[in-house]
Amino acid sequence: MTDPTPLDAPAVDAIVQSAYADACLEQIADTDVWYQVGRDGVIRLVDLTDLAERPTEKRGTATITRPADFARYVTGHHGDGTQVYVDHQAGTAVALIDGHGNQPGHGRHIARLQLRRHPAFDRIASADGRTLTQEEMANWVDDIAEEITPGQLAGEDIAALVDSLHVHANSNQKEVRASGHGRQIIYQEDVTISSGPNSVELPNKIKVTSPVWDGVPKAWTFEIRLSVIAKPGQPTKFKLAIPRLRDVLEAATTEAIETAQDDLPESVPVFAGAFQPAARPTPQLQ
């Protein structure tokens, strides 16, 4: 990116005379910031670089969701003053593209990496901690069928087992010894669960493999624990839990930020931490 021409004193005078001939501009001491006091008494900042012949070429914040795109954007726009701040734990990377000290119009071109979760991972993670009905469980298994790791029941087979799951209860007599009352006969219900015509056992764990962040191709494998809540005469429900979900997210986030960092130009300094744009100075009347 071509750097803008710095505003020297004659250029500032020319701008003031041509654009603010009838206005009274004051300069904040030791800064390149000028302000105008309107007839209503309101102080308004005046950005002279907006009126220069060659103002800063780009301003604003570019929000980018893929690590490789972030690195490519910084590579295409970086200059001598470019700085990048990364926070692996928070999963953020911010590039100050035009950080050229106190030159007018600089420090306002920023690139920010905002990771976006992969749709497949979102489908899996959406069920963590939820209790689903039979219909909801079957639909969810259908949704993640492509992410179910090979070597176990396929998604369509698991969904079929969920659909055909039945709860049976048999009351059996049981003789127990009752203190002071001899023997007593009680009835005890034995609950059994069967699925499908051949009573295939429904797995209590489903292993899945999926990328976590959009634009980061590495896939992560982890387990979903499945518990059946079954009582005779009541709708069967399914409790889902993903014990390693947080660990997978943290590891995948670190990998995504490192991917962006590794693809940056070697000449761009990288700092650990967060970046917050500095507030514009508040004008003070002399």
Image (cartoon, rainbow, N blue to C red):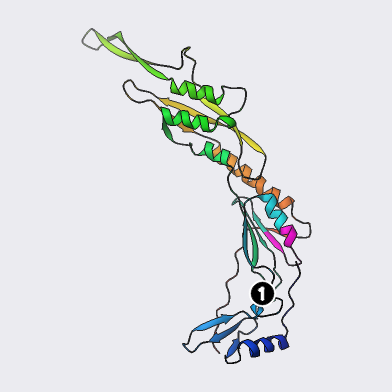
Residue type of the residue flagged with mark 1: Gly
Residue 82 drawn in magenta: yes
- Quarter holding the N terminus is bottom right
Q: Quadrant of residue 19?
A: bottom right
In this view, 257 is above or below 181: below
Local crowd size for mark 1, using a 10 Å CA cut-off: few (<14), some (14–19), many (≥20): many
Give the residue furthest to the left.
181
Whether 249 is drawn above or below 35: the answer is above
User: What range of the chain is rendered magenta?
Assistant: 74-84
Q: Position of residue 72 (x, y in %)?
A: 72, 54
- Between 182 and 215, the residue placed more toward the observer is 215
Q: Which residue is mark 1?
A: 105
Residue farthest to the bottom? 22
What residue is rendered at 46% in x and 16% in y?
A: 196
| Residue 126 drawn at (x, y percent) | 49, 39
Q: Quadrant of the C terminus?
A: bottom right
Above or below 145: residue 17: below
Regarding mark 1 in the picture, which secondary structure is present there?
loop
Q: Which residue sits at x=58%, y=92%? A: 22
Residue at (70, 57) in percent of width and height: 73
